[in-house]
Amino acid sequence: MTGDTTKNIKNFKDIIPQLLAVVFVASMIYVVAIKKPAENNLYAGVGALESASVLDFDCSCEKTFDEPIDINWSGNVISHMVSGEAYGIRKVPPDQENPLFYACCGDSNHQWLSGQVRVEGKWTGITCGYKNSIFGRCVPEVDIEKIEAVEVSEDLDFQDIQSYYNAYQAPSVVHLRKALNGYLSGTNEGMDSEFVIKKRESESYLAGLDSFDKAYYKSKFIVLDITRNDYGGELITIIFRDKPDKIFRAWVYFYWNAGTPDYYDFRDFWQMSVPDDFVAELVAQPQIKAALQDEEHSI
């Protein structure tokens, strides 16, 4: 291993376990996402949830256990809900059966923790809450008894770093860049509908490419997360290198041909609803600064 490579690893040693689970398992997530075609091809991104009457939410997965199960789980925070009292968390180490979980609540847990956390509490059942926005699936529901930030080891396997780098070769990420360039050029290449372009706004929601300064799209972006979308394709969470004051999420859908995705469509784009000071704290962390300054591993 060369000196430059070792230095590169140290610069990125904590990227993986940061807010929104920077893609330390990007390759694995991608494989899971394309394993089989989505059975529900309904056109409905998170931005379309206001028109809930057109959606068919299947919550048959929901259940409440007769006896709660004591848990002590660790994972990376990917989202905050209920004013910071509740968390969406991706387990570390990865759990194939239940990779994500919802943890809530109580005034004492109003901490807006980020990065890696440890949760002690009661696993009370399975919930479909946030299935169509954050998790993309039904997940365990946990009542928090104790939650705390975890100090991440400085050691990071080279394979994890390589998985992060591989995210920039993922077809959905490459297509997102192509579509943003198409929007800037006026050709709108890479998007089949103007839905992703038009501004959509509510009290707590801002979506559509027209809603934001084009300076964002002229900048390269770094990938924070890639996850499967319940309605097909993938959700990609990004920050733009030249304007890192907002966190965005994009939906890239893909069509299937003989079990392989062969046509991509950029379908939705919105700003994630997190406090400005929270974003500022995230991008001020040395490891995220290193990622934002990495010209090669951005797109």
Image (tube, helix red, strand yellow):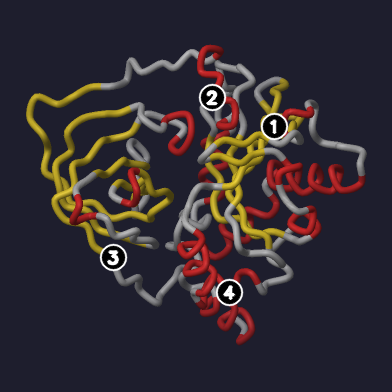
Q: Is residue 147 left or right of residue 245?
A: left
Point out residue 213 in the picture as x, y percentages from the top left corner: 75, 53
Do the residues bearing badges 4 and 2 touch, measured as CB atoms within 8 Å? no
Task: Report whether 197 appears left or right of 79.
Answer: right
Query: Circles 2 and 1: CB distance less than 8 Å?
Result: no
Residue flagged by tag 3: what amino acid is it?
Ala
Say which quarter of the image contains residue 104. top left
Residue with the most extreme front position = 203
Residue 266 falls left or right of residue 203: right
Q: Mark 2 and mark 1: span between their CA atoms?
A: 16 Å
Asked whether the residues under the numbered discs 3 and 2 touch, taking CB atoms below 8 Å apart as contact, a structural biologist would say no
> To which residue does mark 3 refer?
149
**Residue under the image location 61 percent in, 87 percent down:** 3
Q: Which residue is mark 4?
A: 289
Q: Horizontal and vertical percent for residue 199?
A: 71, 36
Q: Can you identify the residue that label 2 sits on?
A: 50
How far apart marks 4 and 3 lie (CA) works out to 20 Å
CA distance for labels 3 and 1: 35 Å
Q: Under tag 4, what secondary structure?
A: helix
* Label 4, residues with CA under 10 Å away: few <14, some 14-19, many ≥20: some
**Is label 3 or label 2 in front?**
2
Could you say whether the residue bearing mark 2 is in a helix, strand or loop? Answer: helix
Please, what is the three-letter code of the amino acid marked with disc 1?
A: Arg
The quarter of the image holding the N terminus is bottom right
Return the residue found at the far bottom. Answer: 3
> How far, Cα to Cα, is label 4 from label 2?
35 Å
Q: Earlier in the sequence, mark 3 or mark 1?
A: 3
Q: Nearer the viewer, mark 4 or mark 2?
A: 2
